[in-house]
Amino acid sequence: MASTEIISSLRGKVIHKNNRKVEYGDQIAPWTPYNANLHMQGIKVVVKDPMPQKVQKGDAFEDTMLLLEMMKERKQKDNKNQKEERIREMAMEKKRKLTEKSKNQYLKLSF
């Protein structure tokens, strides 16, 4: 029987199966992925958002000055809002006083 001859009754059938291939004096052990002679292929990864390149750090002086500037601007804004609120309160009080005066005033006519 030549190696190229195929008996039609044996086509697609398993004649003999080894549990595990024994090489270099290994003992037959139960199958695990580590001893199965599997070879990993490359894994392709699609990068959606690439990592940004390392940002160079500036001087700590610049950061400190930026923080001080931001705090100064916030304090100025708060002071401006407080001043506007005080002006609004003073105007409302003056308006109330004027309306009280106009109610208390009466015209005294003598003939």
Image: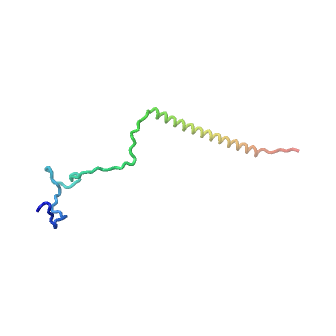
Q: Is residue 47 above or below residue 60?
A: below
Residue at image position (62%, 40%) is: 84
Q: Quadrant location of residue 2?
A: bottom left
Residue at image position (70%, 43%) is: 95
The foreground one among 37 and 41 is 41
Q: Quadrant location of residue 100?
A: top right
The foreground one among 94 and 71 is 71
How many labels sit on residues?
Answer: 0
Residue furthest to the left in view is 1
Residue at image position (49%, 35%) is: 66
The foreground one among 62 and 79 is 62
Please say which color scheme the image uses: rainbow
Q: Position of residue 9 (x, y in %)?
A: 16, 67
Q: Position of residue 51 (x, y in %)?
A: 38, 44
- Quadrant location, the C terminus: top right
Residue furthest to the bottom in view is 9
Q: Is residue 10 above or below residue 86?
A: below
- Quadrant location, the N terminus: bottom left
Q: Position of residue 105 (x, y in %)?
A: 78, 44
Residue at image position (40%, 47%) is: 49
